[in-house]
Amino acid sequence: MNTIRSITFLLTLTTTTSVFAREWSDKTGQYQVDADLIGYSDTTVVLKRKPDDLVAVPIEQLSDSDRKYLETQTKDTITGGGSGNQVWELKSGLKLPGRIVGFDKHGVTIQRRLGKVYVNNQRFDKMPGVYRAIIPKLVAHFTSEEIDGERGLEDWARDQRGKPRTFECAGVMIELEDSNLYCVPFFLFTDETFAMLKPGWERWLAAKEDYDEKEQESFFLQAQTHAYEQQQMRLRQIQKLQLNLQAYDAGLFDLWEVTMYPQAGGYGRPLSVVVPATDSQQAAAVAHQQNPPYIIGPMRIVRRRN
C-alpha cells in the first residue's frame, strides 16, 4: 500500500501462525498484504508483515471487509490493553510487571518533608514495591552515590535537609499494579530491550512539540512491545518444550499434531500446532488453551524417529 508507513522492527519473530493472520487490502482492491493484526486505535491499524516489520495503515483506507473484521475484535484481546500481563526484566534482574504505554521525559523530584520521603509529591512508602526498588537506582545513577535500597534512599533524602532534588527521567511510561503511570528510565533496561525501544524513542524526540505525532509514536510503541512480549512468550514455550524432550524421549508423553479451525463466523486460517500430551483428550485441551478462538480438528501422534 503506497500510504503505509513502515516501521523497522528489530526482532526476529518465531515462525508461528498468528490467530489474527489474514490478507488485508485497501478499499480500491489494488493493494494487498498478508499480515498479522497486532493492534489498532480509532484511526490506525498496526500489522506485522513477514518476515520482520510492522506497518501502520489508516483505517479509513482499508476495505469494507477489513473494517468489518476490526469491529469483531477488541483492543484488549489484541494489544493486551489493560491486561497487565507484560513482565520486563531490568539489568539488575528485577522483574517489572506492567504495561508500557508510551515514551516520556520529565523531572522526578525527591524531597523529604515532615519525616517522609516524597516522589513528585507522592509518598514514597505508598508507591508500588517495584517502583520503590527503582527510585534508589535512579538516584544512584545520577549522583554516583551508593544508595542501598529503600533505607539508603531514606538516609540520602535526610542528608538533603529538606532540599528537593530533581532528576530527569528519559524512558517509558509503564502502567503498574496500582493503575498509575510511572516513568522507568532507559538505563535500567537490558541492552536487548533498549535496542528494541530506541528507534521509537528517537522518532518521539524528533516529533518535539507535535502532540499528534507523539501520540502516534506511543500507539506504535504499545503495539511493538506487545509483539515483543508475544515473541518472548513463544521463546519460553519453545524452551519449555525443549526441557520436556528428555521426558518425551523416555516415553512419558507423546507429541500430538492438532489441526484447528476458526469458529463459525470467525476469521483466520487453519492452524497446525504441536503439543505434548499423554492422550488425545489432553492434547485437545492444551491446544485449545493456547488458541481459544479456534475449535479442534483432526489430531495425530507425531511419529517417533527410530
Image (cartoon, grey):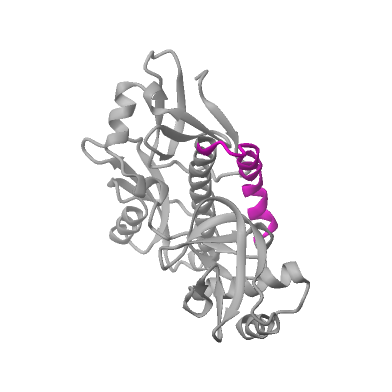
Residue under the image location 32 percent in, 34 percent down? 70
Seen as rendered, the residue at the extreme right is: 144
| Residue 92, position as x, y percentages in the image | 66, 70
- Which residues make up the magenta segment? 189-211
Tell whether position 198 is magenta.
Answer: yes
Q: Residue furthest left?
A: 264
Residue in the image at 61% along x and 72% along y = 110
| Numbered label tally | 0
Left or right placement of residue 271 versus residue 219 in this view: left
Please give left or right for residue 167 compared with residue 289 in the image.
right
**Residue 268 position in % (x across, y down):** 34, 36
In the depicted structure, whether residue 112 falls above or below residue 7: below
Residue at image coords 30%, 22%: 64
Q: Position of residue 143 (x, y in %)?
A: 76, 71
Give whichever of 262, 85 is nearer the camera: 85
Q: Position of residue 231 (x, y in %)?
A: 53, 50
Question: Where 203 falls versus 4 (above or below)?
Answer: below
Q: Would you identify the image quadrant in which residue 138 lies?
A: bottom right
**Figure quadrant of residue 112:** bottom right
At a point 29% along the width and 46% down the height, the residue shown is 293
| Closer-to-camera residue (38/132) | 132
Determine if the magenta segment contains residue 192: yes
- The front one of 83 and 214 is 214
Front-lying residue, 288 or 21: 21
**Helix, strand or loop for the magenta stretch, by majority:** helix
**Quarter location, residue 213:** top right
